[in-house]
Image: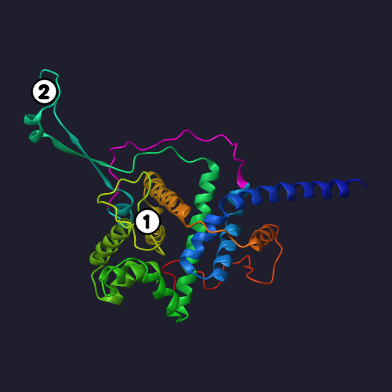
């Protein structure tokens, strides 16, 4: 007769532990998640729903391991290792750090003017290596990537429903001077439209290599508009005139997912090391996205915390509740 009360009290204790962990995680990341969704969508109601879905998908990460779990030793890449610049987002993620190496005089004194003309430039790829972030930071980065992805899919769904206003209002704040610039057209089709490289080529009449080049240049241009701590710029940063709706990391994350969709078949046949390198680059993109999202923090509505905790416990609320299955409009890039 005592088994049922024990089982009930055990379940209550587990739920209390889960609620406490989820509540702590939400209070640490809620402002950044809501600010990111609001920056992309510019509609508070949709931003709330997107944040709720992002937390629902990240529940397994939140509950997976305690923050005090032992971490694997960091394995940073050497500072002078060249990144894979064959992908547009790979070129935008890494910049060049230029240093001047001046030869020392034979007598060991200070270098004088006669030695300066023979100084040579030494190129190193940045940003400098950093140790792997702890588990809570990785979980928050994964959450922000989920929120960002769902928000962009919502914009794409609005466009598919022939609601052009959110699509064009967001693209107007990207920072391109000419609205007819082909860089803007290619970027908007890839980012908001979810088009593949070949899809953009068919729609615009451009060759696929041209589409790839324009997309890479457009991401480089966006990356120049926002200063990122510990990021080595290739050019002098120019502060934006207004807060941009999107920045380089937002673009990088979407394009990274787009490229992952394209090479999924190849990932099954290539060496495991290549797949790990690709995952490492995507992780670096999410890290940059999280650092940029810090400047977008907005206090979420008070009722949002209660709704997210209710979602964690499986309680369905009438407004904005997401079913356990994927919504019909939430498609991966390239799905028909």
Crowd around label 2: few <14 · some 14–19 · many ≥20 (10 Å) = few
Most extreme residue toward the top is 107
Q: Name the disc covering residue 172, or none.
A: none
> For residue 89, which quarter of the picture?
bottom left
Residue 169, given in percent of the width and then of the height, sits at 41, 74
Residue 8, given in percent of the width and then of the height, sits at 83, 50
Left or right: where 72 falls relative to 215: right
Q: Name the disc covering residue 266, or none.
A: 1
Q: Quadrant of the C terminus?
A: bottom left
Q: In the rendered structure, does residue 72 fall within the stretch colored magenta?
A: yes
Residue 166, given in percent of the width and then of the height, sits at 45, 75
| SS category of the residue bearing label 2 | loop
| SS category of the residue bearing label 1 | helix
- Looking at the rendering, the stretch of residues picked out in magenta corresponds to 64-85
Residue that numbered label 2 is attached to: 105
Determine the CA span between mark 2 and mark 1: 53 Å
Mark 2 and mark 1 in contact? Answer it, CB < 8 Å: no
**Looking at the image, is mark 2 or mark 1 nearer the viewer?**
2
Left or right: where 298 falls relative to 238: right
Q: In the rendered structure, does residue 10 fall within the stretch colored magenta?
A: no
Most extreme residue toward the bottom is 162
Residue at x-position 50% and y-position 35%: 72
Residue 229, given in percent of the width and then of the height, sits at 38, 46
Q: So how many labels did they put on this image?
A: 2
């Amino acid at each position: 007769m005592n088994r049922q009360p024990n089982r009930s009290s055990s379940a209550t204790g587990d739920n209390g532990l889960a609620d406490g962990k989820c509540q702590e995680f939400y209070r640490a990341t809620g402002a950044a998640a809501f600010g990111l969704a609001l920056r992309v969508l510019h509609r508070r109601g949709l931003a709330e729903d997107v944040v709720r879905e992002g937390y629902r998908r990240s529940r397994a990460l939140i509950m997976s391991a305690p923050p005090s779990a032992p971490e694997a030793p960091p394995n940073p890449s050497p500072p002078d290792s060249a990144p894979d610049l064959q992908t547009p987002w790979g070129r935008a993620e890494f910049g060049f750090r230029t240093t001047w190496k001046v030869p020392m005089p034979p007598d060991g004194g200070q270098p004088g003017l006669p030695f300066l003309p023979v100084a040579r430039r030494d190129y190193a790829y940045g940003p400098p290596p950093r140790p792997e972030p702890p588990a809570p930071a990785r979980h928050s980065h994964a959450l922000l990537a989920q929120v960002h992805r769902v928000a962009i899919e919502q914009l794409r769904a609005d466009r598919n429903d022939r609601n052009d206003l959110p699509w064009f209002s967001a693209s107007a704040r990207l920072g391109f001077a000419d609205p007819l610039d082909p860089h803007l057209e290619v970027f908007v089709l890839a980012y908001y439209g979810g088009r593949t490289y070949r899809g953009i080529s068919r729609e615009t009449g451009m060759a696929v290599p041209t589409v790839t080049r324009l997309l890479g240049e457009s991401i480089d241009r966006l990356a120049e508009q926002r200063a990122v701590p510990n990021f080595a710029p290739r050019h002098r940063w120019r502060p934006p005139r207004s807060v941009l709706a999107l920045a380089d990391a937002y673009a990088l994350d979407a394009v990274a997912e787009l490229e992952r969709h394209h090479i999924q078949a190849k990932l099954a046949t290539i060496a495991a090391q290549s797949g790990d390198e690709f995952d490492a680059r995507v992780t670096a993109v999410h890290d940059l996205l999280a650092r940029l999202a810090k400047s977008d923090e907005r206090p979420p509505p008070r009722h949002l915390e209660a709704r997210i905790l209710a979602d964690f416990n499986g309680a369905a609320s009438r407004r904005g509740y997401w079913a356990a299955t994927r919504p019909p409009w939430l498609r991966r890039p390239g799905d028909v």
